Amino acid sequence: MPPIANLQTVTLGPSGLVVPALGIGTWAWGDSIFWDYGKAYSDSDLESAFGAALDAGLTLFDTAEIYGFGQSERLLGRFMQQRPGQAAIATKYFPLPWRFSQQSVADALTASLDRLQVASVALYQVHWPLDFLLSQQDLMLALAAEVKRGRIGAVGVSNYSANQMREAHRYLADQGVPLAANQVQYSLLNRKPETNGVIATARELGVTILAYSPLAQGLLTGKYTPEANLKPAGARWLDPRFSQSGLTKLMPVIRALTEIGEKRDRTPAQVALNWLVCQGNVLPIPGAKNARQAAQNGGALGWELAPDDVAQLTQLTQAYC
């Protein structure tokens, strides 16, 4: 697939980091507990996904030290050796209870950099707003120090509320470092960031929203319907939305995505992702377990939904706010 013409870009917060308006989430890379890694797909599938994403112009890959207990980072590190200098990496620090000093933040970052086989990452995020023995202020001080040290291009948070984001922003600002991003679950089937103040606060502070699970773990792809009777791989089948009754309830949304997509020769997934891009200041990071999925993700960029289509989908999914 050739690179997309007029690929939209996003500047991550006030940090100045410019990336494509859509990234690739790698939670499933190396995760055999939730995603069935090693059974439903292999390392070679993931390497093909990595290459297809880059070929489509998607250069931002989001990972975390806890994904596959480090395996996601290790795989990315290996794949990047074949395509050096082409990928931008966002990874995450998990505030475990026994990480009680600023040095523990530096040590966790060092371990991530070793697994990724890089000297620095574009974005380093706090995975959850947990306070144990290390306060948010000390955590932000440690992250600001790593920006000044050159091992982090920008600081982000994940799953932070509006107030928690404001607090992190303030502590970083005291060190002269901007808060670049807040990664939250956001999709047509989870629009809570619109009503809980997260999106409004992010816009006010100049913080970019990274939308994880933007396809609701596959529900918005159109693949799962009451008639198809497909069972998702891994632990997703436990989600009641994948049940017969759950899928029946979702069908008006799936039908609208399909109809809008047919007008533009796009898939339901591409329409759902484009709706997020159209919100402004939102960067979706859908997963991709093979080359086909990565290329399909890329097809969500390079075009824009008509305002009427955006309004229709917004109205149709109002119950998910």
Image: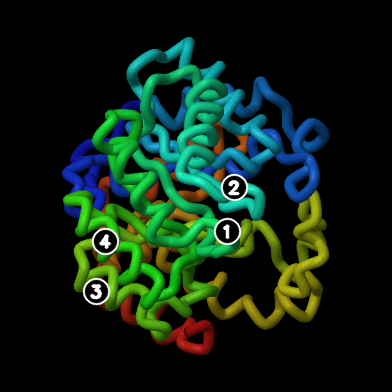
**Residue type at the position of mark 2:** Arg
Residue situated in front as seen by the camera: 180 or 294: 180
Query: Is 173 placed left or right of 193 in the picture?
Result: left
The image quarter in which residue 274 lies: bottom left
**Residue type at the position of mark 4:** Val
Q: Which residue is mark 2?
A: 99
Q: Residue at x 20, y 47 (%)?
A: 15
Q: Which residue is mark 3?
A: 307
**Residue type at the position of mark 1:** Leu
Query: Is 314 placed left or right of 35 in the picture?
Result: left
Query: Is 14 placed left or right of 99 in the picture?
Result: left
The image quarter in which residue 246 lies: bottom right
Q: Earlier in the sequence, mark 2 or mark 4?
A: 2
Q: From this view, report whether residue 42 is shown above or below residue 160.
A: above
Badge 2 crowding class, 10 Å Cα cut-off, few under 14, some 14 to 19, many 20 or more, is: some
Marks 2 and 3: which is nearer the front? Answer: 2
Q: Secondary structure at mark 4?
A: loop
Badge 1 crowding class, 10 Å Cα cut-off, few under 14, some 14 to 19, many 20 or more, is: some
Distance between mark 3 and mark 4 Cα atoms: 24 Å
- Can residue 109 be seen by looking at this rendering? yes
Q: From this view, report whether residue 320 is shown above or below residue 85.
A: below
Q: Residue at x 61, y 33 (%)?
A: 72
**Residue type at the position of mark 3:** Pro
Q: Which residue is mark 4?
A: 207
Q: Which residue is mark 1?
A: 133
Q: Position of residue 158 (x, y in %)?
A: 46, 58
